Image (cartoon, rainbow, N blue to C red):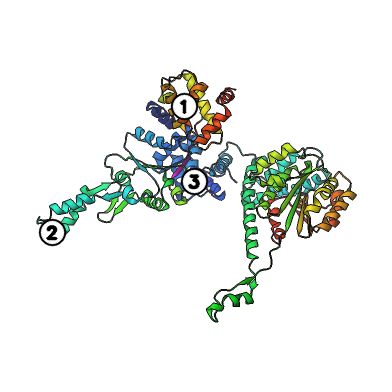
Amino acid sequence: MEHYTNYSGLEASILGFCQLCRSHDLAIGLNHSEEALIAAQGGFISDSKSLKIALRSIFCTCEEEHSTFDRLFDIYWRKRRHEYMPKTRTRKQTKIVKETKGSVVLMGVGDHEEDEKKDARNVSGANKMESLRKTDFSKVAAIDHALLDELAEKLLLQLNHRLKRRLKASKEGKIDLRKTIRSNLSRGDTFIELLKKNRKFEKYRLIILLDVSGSMDKYSFYLLKFIWTLKSNFKNIEAFIFSTKLLRITEYMERVEIDQAMLQMNTNSDHWSSGTVIGKCLQEFNDQYAKKILNGRSITIILSDGLDTGEPELLSEELKKIRLRTSKVIWLNPLKGMEGYEPLAKGMKAALPNIHTFESAHNLESLMELEKYLSHV
Amino acid sequence: MLPEISQLIAKLDEHDYVVEEELATILLLMLKLNKPLLLEGPPGVGKTEAAHIIATYLKTDLIRLQCYEGLDVNSAVYEWNYQKQLLSIKLTENSELSPSEKESHIFGDEFLLKRPLLQAITATEKPPVLLIDEVDRADEEFEAFLLELLSAYQISIPEMGTIKATHKPIVLLTSNRTRELSDALKRRCLYHWVPYPEFQKELAIINKHLPDINRELATQLVKFVQYLRSLKLDKSPGIAESIDWAQGLIALGAESFSEEYINQSLGVVLKSDKDITSIKNQGINSILNEIEA
């Protein structure tokens, strides 16, 4: 438990705080603990602001660490117990499952803020970063958003690196005997240089359709971030957002900064947080773009929760058209991450027969797992 | 606030230094722990000034080492006065001294040119304040050398042996963060990030430096400079620039903070052609209106 009242005496509480900071990746050596102790004994303990400034200058090695430190300090040295302290974990967790099950049905109806707060408390434990990876985007408490952003950037960058490495490795092919003999002719009978045969690199096109309707609100920002990561790997990428209308956002993606791009998208459309008519949007896509951009070497990814207010028949039909034009249709549904979720929504049910892969996309870890589909692209 | 800290602030105020609580706390901690302090922050926020502050407070010497790329031991630690040594050899050529005596003579104290780091270590009376300025500009090799100095406070000179510090100097390092310093160096230091000052502090500093300045003028000037910092300029103005600007406006005989005077003296506060044109294009009057709003 991370609170100074859990330790008896000045020394123990300072050392407890050092342990806490260490477990949150601040680089604190033995000498730092000792100095912290000297500082505290030297009078700094009597004023909490002075103690904060003093310990911060001892523990932090760059400005970026200040926010982590401040948060830990506030939790640990608070007069009363912090409201985000983990309490009885096990009982609450079973409760989440129940609540989330309920909220699938209730999605879009009623106010869930209270539940969200409750759930968020359960994830702020000791190993925050690890649990954030696995936390559903919609259940991240407001205080953790900055942390999640940071983590997302880090992980998505990793994904980016890995994808690049895989592409490079796949270029290594079999030894091309004919070319090898020919190029080594001048060296007598020893082969010094081995030439390799490569399978011709096939360029796939990636088409992404992101649902930004109200029910996807909590996810769309992170999914958009995910799309931004992909764009640096796939030169050939087309992205759309849809809710009641379809909007091509490929041109916005040339902008480097995602925030700027989002601002522009916002001003140019009233798509965000509105209703969902998936079928109509796919029809629009098929009419306007499909012929131009879909071919045998394209993969279509649809990011949506499948909660549709349009006609399921239309959705099914339009999706079938897409399937016939593209080599693979992947549907990523954030709701699939919830325990006990079944694609019962009529839109989702109609879509299922026409998609190749159905995966979840509700937290960072599930996004990272998409690597297995993307690396073969 | 601890009474010790408020005393420190009051005392520094007597010496015309404006120090906010955070910096004062850390300066006090530095003195208590006897540990080097690393100050990082954008240029012109008074990092170097902090060393002057602490030296004045302790009434001790300030020894300054300005780092630059290619800084080596010769200019940072010590150098033998080669010419003087040669001369001395010539002079003692015909004397009765044995070769080993001659050698120990020319490698004696009087032929040693002390550079800042050695000066700091051999100070006899009081522990001096050693300011290692812009350490990020020095090479990594030099940083490694500093590590040795900061942990053991001794310097070895092959001809003379190891020289230990008589008093542990009070060390301040500053960095503009043009590159990330090594973890090992950071571990040995307290760390403090110095941000741009807030409105009240900057106004107080200007009033301290220029007691005769028109209050109204100073207030508007600080507001203007703070506004400039909020823009994404090539070179954001620091406190030094605001003081210079205030001085410049007084020299121009400016009564009020008007467009005419600003136009004449914008070069004092903005040091890049691109910034000046972009501000002029934006229209100084419109900025004045905006900061008044």
Q: Position of residue A18 (x, y in %)?
A: 52, 47
In the image, the segment drawn in magenta is B189-197
In this rendering, would B34 be left or right of A62? Answer: left
Q: Earlier in the sequence, mark 2 or mark 1?
A: 2
Q: Amino acid at mark 1?
A: Ser
Q: Quadrant of residue B55?
A: top left
Q: In the image, is residue A119 above or below residue B200?
A: below
Q: Which of the two residues, A368 or A116, is positioned nearer the viewer here?
A: A368
> Label 3: which residue?
A61
Q: Quadrant of the C terminus of chain A?
A: bottom right
Q: CA distance from mark 2 to mark 1?
A: 69 Å
Name the side, left or right, on which A272 lies relative to B121.
Answer: right
Numbered disc 3: secondary structure: loop
Amino acid at circle 2? Ser
Q: Are marks 2 and 3 in contact (CB under 8 Å)?
A: no
Specify the amino acid type for callout 3: Thr
Q: Which residue is mark 1?
A: B265
| Side of A98 relative to B232 (left or right) | right
- Between marks 1 and 3 in the image, the one whose residue lies nearer the viewer: 1
Closer to the camera in the image, A157 or A1: A157
Chain identifier of the residue bearing label 2 in the image? B
Badge 2 crowding class, 10 Å Cα cut-off, few under 14, some 14 to 19, many 20 or more, is few
Front: mark 2 or 1: 1
